[in-house]
Image: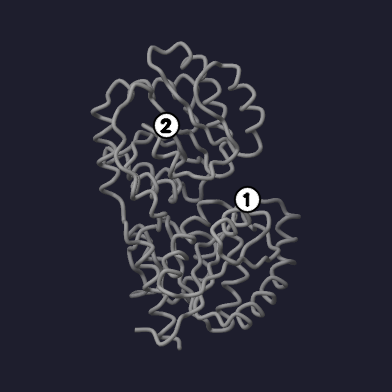
Amino acid sequence: MLKRPRVFLMAGGGTGGHVIPLLAVARALEKRGHEVFFVGTRQGMEAKLVPAEGFPIEWVEVGALKRVGLWRRLRTLVELPAGVVRCLALLRRRGTDAVLSLGGYAAGPPVLAALLRRIPVVVMEPNAMPGFTNRKIARWVARALVSFEETARWFPPGRCELTGLPVREEFFRLPPKPPGPEFTVLITGGSRGAQSLNRAAQESWPLFRGAEFPVRLIHQAGAAQAAELHKAFAGTGLRGEVVAFLDDMPAAFAEADLVVCRSGAGAVAELAAAGKPSILVPFPFAADDHQLRNAQALERTGAARIILDRELTGRRLFEEIAALQRDREELVRMGERARKLARPDAARRAAEILEEVAEEAA
């Protein structure tokens, strides 16, 4: 048993895929009597999601280093030392016992500060190929929580555990959706949307309008294109909605007969937890093509179908959805296969490991 409640820092941000798993672990730690706070940027999804869950968040100014222009890269390198200094003060002021990092540029300053102060860092690496930050700090981490066995080769021997990616409990509680008279499709390109998915969805609307089956489309389009698409969709006569962001994604999953989405680690873990059949469109520029690898893992089990981004058109999207709508028994089987891939204890196990490393360092 721990002698006292501990203080844990959650590091990672930018997208919902970085933040949502950290929130799942934060809730598990809170239930065990610990104090949790986040560090992130005001521009990332953490600025919206973390306060909504009631957790405190401290701000740092730092940008990306990968897939950005030279000016943005230079500015990030200038901002990084100031961010590390701020995080050093935060760690001391809050009496932080351990840090959990999911990577991403927002994780850089708090992780570097923790390593400088010899505070244990646990990294969560959901992809087969570790991200930039996790690769750089691999030799110094206390533990690495991975989703693929091959990821272990990037970390020192004996420090990896196959835990899977934490997913909100609400996804695991979703019951199978029985077939109904209306076929509901959830289309989402993630918290910021996906331009190719948005384009293909819009191209498919005339085909769905002429389809022989009633359909309802729920489309998370991202802030950049949502207003334009919402206006265009309103004139189609189709049932459904186009929104910038879905605040309650488990509720949207509950309504869906089929999910069309990217295949990032977070999306794949949520599909498995909810037991949802899916059409996956891997992001073609993902580092080391990890989204394609994730999608192929689901396809091999029969839980998903794949459409490559370069092959995605409105007609192809419509035809794949229509084929699955006609084969409801296959849809049920796909959902069952997806559910078998779920790891319901990932958040609890991550919380236990954080407790262990904090106790070892005390």
Q: Quadrant of the C terminus?
A: bottom left
Query: How much space separates mark 1 and mark 2, taking CA atoms?
Result: 24 Å
The quadrant holding residue 40 is bottom right
Helix, strand or loop status at disc 2: loop
- Residue 38, horizontal then vertical, whole percent: 57, 67
Relative vertical location of residue 127 with respect to residue 145 in this rendering, above or below:
above
Horizontally, residue 236 falls left or right of residue 61, namely left
Q: 73 or 161: nearer the eye?
A: 161
Relative vertical location of residue 97 with respect to residue 51 in this rendering, above or below:
below
The quadrant holding residue 55 is bottom right
**x 57%, y 27%: residue:** 199
Other-residue count near label 2 (Cα within 10 Å), few / some / many at <14 / 14–19 / ≥20: some
The three-letter amino acid code for the residue at tag 2 is Ile
* Disc 1 + disc 2, Cβ < 8 Å: no
Residue where numbered disc 2 is placed: 307
- Residue 75, horizontal then vertical, whole percent: 75, 61
Residue where numbered disc 1 is placed: 67
- Residue 321, horizontal then vertical, whole percent: 39, 24
Q: Quadrant of the N terminus?
A: bottom left
Horizontally, residue 132 falls left or right of residue 152, namely right
**x 56%, y 51%: residue:** 15
**x 49%, y 69%: residue:** 100
Relative vertical location of residue 184 with respect to residue 266 in this rendering, above or below:
above
Q: 188 or 238: nearer the eye?
A: 238
Horizontally, residue 65 falls left or right of residue 139, namely right
